[in-house]
Image: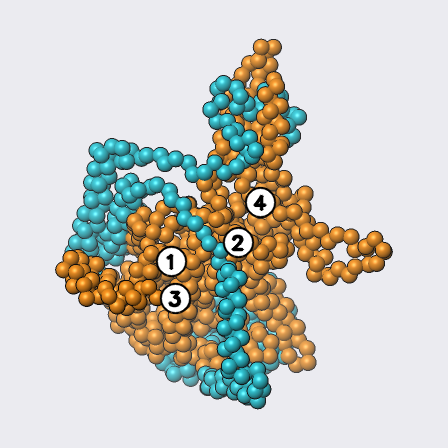
Amino acid sequence: MSTENHAKTAPATASTDTRKQAPAGERVADWADGRLGIYSLAKANMRKIFPDHWSFMLGEICLYSFIIIILTGVYLTLFFHPSMNEVEYHGSYVPLQGQLMSEAFNSTMHISFDVRGGLLIRQIHHWAALIFLAGMFVHMMRVFFTGAFRKPREVNWLFGFLLFVLGMFTGFTGYSLPDDLLSGTGVRFMQGAILSVPIVGTYLSMFLFGGEFPGGDFVARFYSVHILLLPGIMLGLVVAHLILVFYHKHTQFAGPGKSNKNVVGMPLLPVYMAKAGGFFFLVFGIIAAIAAIASINPIWALGPYRPDQVSTGAQPDWYMGFAEGLIRVMPGWEINIWGHTLVLGVFIPLVIFPLVLAAIAVYPFIESWVTGDKREHHILDRPRNAPTRTGFGVAWITAYMIMLIGGGNDLWATHFHLSLNAITWFVRIFFFAGPVIAFIVTKRICLGLQRRDRDKVLHGRESGLIKRLPHGEFIEVHEPLDRDQLHTLTAHEQYKPLEIGATVDENGVERKVKGSEKLRAKLSKGMYGEESQIPKPTAEEYKEITSGHGHH
Amino acid sequence: MSSQEIPEENLPSEQESAHGAVAVADEADPFADPGLPPHENRVQDIDEQAARRSERTVALLFTISMLATVGFIASFVAFPVDKSVYIWPIGHISALNFALGMTLGVALFCIGAGAVHWARTLMSDVEVADERHPIEAEPEVKAKVMADFAAGAKESQLGRRKLIRNTMFGALAMVPLSGVVLLRDLGPLPEDKLRHTLWSKGKLLVNMNTNEPLRPSDVQVGSLTFAKPEGLEEHDHDFQKEIAKAALMIVRIQPDNIKDKRELEWSHEGVVAYSKICTHVGCPISLYEQQTHHVLCPCHQSTFDLSDGARVIFGPAGHALPQLRIGVNEEGYLEALGDFEEPVGPAFWERG
């Protein structure tokens, strides 16, 4: 109300005053503020504090490579013809002269050999896509292992996960567009996998390809999915992801002066404007240099797609290698009943693929259900302090990596002179055994590190100095930690395992305990029981030890 | 790990003179948060000389970037698009691509390096603490929202007028069906399209490389020949679709070595014809092991024994390759004696 009064009296004088005095920039800002309210926006965000840690850069790599992909992608659409009409090649690349190929392949050849800088942009686009996916994978693992997905960030975790999944499919539809021999083989693989779907497989395939494979439609269809549908959704998700990062404020690691109620770091303007803005140019510069020296997807060496031709060593882009591994190592089970075929050998991998991805996506919700913790968490966990979570994450990565080995089993065989059959069997066994081993080993390492932290807090740091006592004994001097370190190493919280309590009360009446509660208690014991964490040192323990020494 | 194993002398001893400075100041809680550590000055904060050096470094980086952009434009004009150049250790690469990429890379990288160096050495690096506020709304806010919602819902009368509610939900649920129906014409129904190929009785087997009809004598032991049905030409409109099903693989095996009885019957003097399309997910099979008559799909390594009904001996394929029954016509050319008896390529629900 008071502003209204102010507005009534002020304008006549104020506007004439500012028009005389305010510099041009301010006048533009005033104009924008009157229409967009930018000053309120800037008040909250211009000097927003961001904490500093190298791992917080990983998400930036994803964002910047995404921007690079969009910029270069728009350029490529100016030259690419998403058509499967057959043409004869008459470009400047001699070995393919006169060959029949689709317009898609022909225009990609044109971009690569006749448009100046076209090859560079194509290679930046493809390299940036690989880096985008790799960046998202590593960023996701950073968030996972530090527990940054906990309340209030679960939704943002899902946004990020969706971006990773959509990124995979955008990548797949993208590298299928040139209609070269390698990518066409990949599309055929996808079509074969779709055919395996019970009941509707053949229908899905016919509808997707506009008839029998390969037909004349899929490049145009993939094109609109690749440049419009998926990137449109992803752009929305990226914006939402960033808005939530700003809204929640960034997480930080424990340390002196850092608490769950504050965020310690440096302001957006100027430090992160310069650092993050500069980092965009660093990422772009490095990708441009990679594209200058490292050839990627040389379609001229592969030739146009023919369903009856193939090259050896066919590999998808790395992020599809996991799915490729599943399909390669799965035994060829087929069940024929009542005139129908259940193609388990292909369909099971097709189902496992999303299930494995979903396993990591739902973990945050399982963890919060087990802990029952409804508080906000802004202080990151050190991975060692959440051994079960860390173990699960490493187990997941292990399964992923083993399947990646399976996806390249022919390359492993030829490069390391191994038996293909042996690699396949290794992958079959260790897809199950590997994660279990990884879980146990990781958990033990975490517990060991927790013990070391505990010892460091209670007994100080090994200084490496050897002291000789008057009676001749040699001892190593332990240096006590300073207060900053003492705080940092003991700042984490430790959950207590959930107790169901007595199921029979004092009158002998049995209390019903739901099965889900029993499971929750069991999981809680597994995650936070004695076997799963080392009690962090208490102030009493510390005082007893230090004061005990005082008597000496 | 316990304290008992460690001699007393090894325990932390802030009381001892050497390390007395870092003491447990807070008697109540030795692990209490000591607060933000004091800011440590960088050399640029106290030495203007050093700060000026930083300034020059940043300016130099930005200048290099400008020069690189000039270099980019010069390269674009100067290098012909088809010029190849030898660069150690990469090898022969496109001169234009290399020059454009490197100049663009340097131009971008130097902007980034300059900005980051500026931020790290000259901008204030004093750490500041900002407060956080709970994301959840205050109870009063929540109560207001709930009351507003209840008022709005009541005013709409949606809860009271069930007829409106039910028909609205019905209409909203049905209207997307139009969109689904529109997708129907994305493609034809499968019907029996996957069961038939171009092969039929009397169609000649045409060598894929020479485009000539094959005679039995053209197929030698140990060689792998690819064939297509006569009349199918590369320029044909649906060549890709047809060859994806009709592609054929022909080998000659000594009849004594053919283990499968039906395979022997369907062959001609040891010349056998199998579908080239893998029964796993449809890659063309292209690797042939002459001694064992095994063929291998290079995509997912399914291995088939051509001397034994092309049964699967390794890999993810679920069933044997379909065999084409062949014979010889009056002129001595190899001909098909019909279509494949089962669908070629990957298995599917209706295959049976």
Q: Which residue is mark 2?
A: A376
Q: Which residue is mark 4?
A: A493
3 or 2: tag closer to the N-terminus: 3
Q: Amino acid at mark 3?
A: Leu
The secondary element bearing badge 3 is classed as helix
Hey, what amino acid is under mark 1?
Answer: Leu
Task: Judge left or right: residue A366 versus residue B116.
Answer: right
Q: Which quadrant: the C terminus of chain A?
A: top right
Return the residue at label 1: A63
Name the residue that disc number 3 marks.
Answer: A235
Which of A223 and B90 lies nearest the eye of the viewer?
A223
What color does chain B have in the rendering?
cyan
What is the C-alpha distance between the residues marked 4 and 1?
32 Å
Q: Of tags 3 and 2, which is closer to the observer? A: 2
Looking at the image, residue B176 sits to the left or right of residue A275; the answer is right
- Check the residue under mark 1 and report the chain it is in: A
As drawn, the residue found furthest toward the left would be A20
In the image, residue A524 above or below residue B173: above
Q: Quadrant of the N terminus of chain A?
A: bottom left
User: What amino acid is at disc 4?
Assistant: Glu
